[in-house]
Amino acid sequence: MRYINRKPASPNQGRQSSTKSEDPVQAKTALKQSELSEKLDDNLNTLKQLLENCSDAVTRELLIGAEASLKAAVLYFDGLIDRKEIEQHLLRPLVYLKTIPGLLTEDNQSSFIEQLSQQLLPVGELKTLSTFEAVCDHITAGDTVLLIDGYKQGIAVGSRSWQTRSIDAPENESTIFGPKEGFTETLRFSTAQLRRRLKCTDLKIEAMSMGRISKTTVVVCYVEDIAPQSLVAEIRRRLKSIDIDAVLDTAYLEEYLSDDRFSILAQVEYTERPDRICGHLLEGRVAILADGSPMAMVVPTSFPQFLNSGEDYYQNFIVSSLMRLGRLTALFIALLLPSVYVAVVTYHHEMIPLSLYLTLVAARQGVPFPAAVEALMLEVTFELLREAGLRLPRAIGPAVSIVGALIIGDAAVQAGLVGTPMVVVVAFTGIASFVTPSYNAGLMIRVIRFGMLLLAATLGFFGIIMGLLLLAIRMASLSSLGQPYLAPLAPLNRAQLSDILLRRPWSLTSQRPYREGMKNQPRQKLPENREGS
Amino acid sequence: MRKMLLVWLLLSLLSLCLAGCYNRLELDDSVGVTGFGLDVEGEQKVFLVQVTSPSGKPEGGQTAKVDTLVLKEKAAGYAQAARQITLSFPRTPVWSLATTILLGEQLAREDLALVMDFVSRNRFIRPNMLLFLTAGTTPEEVMQLKTPPENHSLVALEKIIRGQQNYAEIYLPVTLREFRTKYATPGVEPVLPQVRIEENAGEKTLRIHGVAVFRERRLVGELDEIESRGLRFLDAGEMRGGLVTVNLSGNRQSGPLEEMVSMEIIRSRARCTPLINEDGSIEMLIDIEADGNLYEQTTTENLQTTENLPRLEQLTAAAIKEDAMACIKKAQLLGSDIFGWGEIISRKHPAVWRQLEADWPAHFSNLKVRAEARYSIRRAYLLDGPVPIKN
């Protein structure tokens, strides 16, 4: 109820003063929920109260009908509508009505609204409204509402049109092969991109409005029969149970779709690539998109999924398989390299070959801090540099990289604050942490890395193994919307294994990944002679 | 009640962390150990350690200069002496980096039992460390020796014995684990490669020369290079390299120079089988089978003919047998069963072994041996015959 307190307590006492409510908030709610009246002036008065201080609201009053006898009003929000469209297809026919009086006769007056919507207005989307709330909802969404004196209904005309970013290549997920289109902030364009790729009525795009103030349209996309019904129902149930004032990005919904809300482990996948979403939909997952956000969310997730890039499926499967193995290696490097280095250097000297030991000792000569502190310092510096570089105006960007590379990299070593090997370790870890294609999974690895570092600094390899064990136990016990987080590694599904660590060639992929309740399992019909091979 | 239990559990778990850092050792407080030496001086035990000390930071892509330091301490026991090092040296030695142990000749002559407990019990000493005996010198001298291009003589020693395995293949590296097993097992005696210091034109160099032979707890003698090669031929393990030089005249030692032929060994394995005769006497049957290539000839005669090749094969086989017999003779002379024949007998004929066990060295010295060697030529590298000569 936070937002309500911010509203100025205005002494507006409209037609609904009969409710006798002292609370202006309740009064306003009652006002909104009341029905439109037959008198246009009353309606306009009420709307004026509701639209008070909304400088972008436009109310255009006009006279229509024979001898301009009928008062009417058109309401819309400036900037959200296509003016030409409204002028051409709403205002112009209405104005013409005046010159064709025969159309408006007393006997068919009762169905004048019907007549208007069925015959006279050449627009695609039309809807009759009967409450103020509906009127407000439509005009804030970019529709134009027509009110006519003497009628209890209004007509909403679809006229949504606003300035948007054009569809371009997704910046955060660029690929060499594959489509270069990404989602944009306008939901309709995003869903259109999905529909364009899966031209099938089985692709369902269920819409719901979320957020009491933001009234964001959120859509749940899935392919019927492939996505298990129970899964879709669960997602629907969870989304419906959310009562929040605004949904400004898809990510607002992440916690509600995670089985463990307080876990650091990423439990949803984000992408702005329609082709990747389609790939997920065909594997029986469900995508959730919200208006105003180019990021689509995919559930349920399993951890191995974060290591896959959409591009894997556009390249030769051998190359892709090697890439996947490389990413797995990079994952472990990003997670463990600094901690293994610290553990080896402070506890397990016998692990180092003599010549390397001599190099390391020479490089650490005179470094004032213990290796663990040194690692922590450099890791934090690296993370700060990364964070700074993320939000920098483009003009300052190079300055930060120069400062980062020169001051931190070189000067710190020259000054004897850190040893060269640690710089190498941290730099390599940094590079490895950017290999993970999924950004939020990469973030989670970064955070866990610090925990590992502390464990390694206090307990050595023993600590690292304990940390890995804890992580493995946590991951194995986690689920994402009821699906095991480590599937198909644990519980083991041998048939799926070849598409997790490696990329299976299409000619050997006849089944979709197993999901409970999935009806449509076969992915392709293999030719008879290849079935056995 | 439950809460208390949880608190106790938490506290005990947290105390685990306190134990964590106890053996923490920063790199710059540590010093690398390449190996150590054990010897005796009178009643005192001598403990030596060779450490590496980087002098100065690496600059401009150059690796750091490294100095060798030899630290020496004397005490009543080796462990005591090792700990005394910290009284005069500021850094903690990282023992587990060490790869080589040198045993002093004096110590080996007195009693191996003086050190065997120390090297076996101490958790910082790896069982896969290499053991050497310093012959005609002391561990300290070997450690102090400059061995360019290696910075540390003990590292050089390790590389030498591993390197010769691929080319000369005369000596077998002996690890602490192996030595300890042979020390403890009845029916087999330990051996160690010997390291000597040779002086050539005022320059002192390291050389692996000969094999030290032990009997029970003491050093009793050594094998020279040819006998060491014989020992290598008799080892059950497969041989990967090495040259055997034969003379076409049949006289290996003093045959005419232009009739020398070098035969390479690429594979060799030996089988020793004890044979109990009807009269109860034991005979060892030795069967050596080797393959190899013609590697070098000094004669201009074509050796790669159907007549000459079998002759060469026989000559080489005879040479192998000769080396092996020389080694056996020496071992029997020293009364030390370095081949582990006693152990073979104990495995194959336990009843017989029980009678021999008590007086095995004497029985070993009088053991009849029948050796047989075979050699086959496989290839001759780039030449089909001798290099043609202008008429």
Image: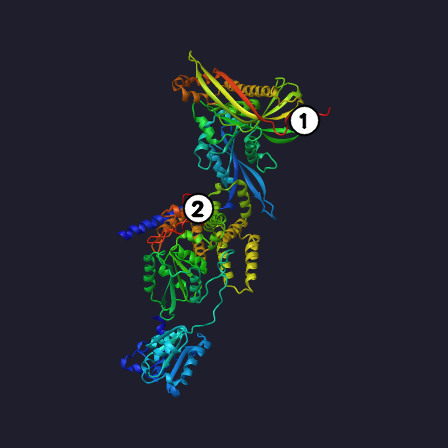
Vertical comparison of A419 with B75: above or below: below
Residue projecting furthest to the top: B279
Q: Quadrant of the C terminus of chain A?
A: top left
- Specify the label residue B387 is tagged with: 1
Vertical comparison of B91 with B355: above or below: below
Q: Based on the displayed image, in which of its 4 quarters is residue A226 positioned?
A: bottom left
Q: Nearer the viewer, residue A527 or B278?
A: A527
Q: Position of residue B103 (x, y in %)?
A: 51, 29
Q: What's under tag 2, amino acid-wise?
A: Gly
Residue A9 seen in the current view = no
Residue under label 2 = A460
Q: What's under tag 1, amino acid-wise?
A: Val
| Tag 2 and tag 1 share a subunit | no
- Specify the label residue B367 is tagged with: none
- Please tell me how crowded label 2 is: few (under 14), some (14-19), or many (20+) other residues with Cα within 10 Å: many
Please, what secondary structure does the residue beneath circle 2 have? Answer: loop
Q: Quadrant of the N terminus of chain A?
A: bottom left
Q: Chain of mark 1?
A: B
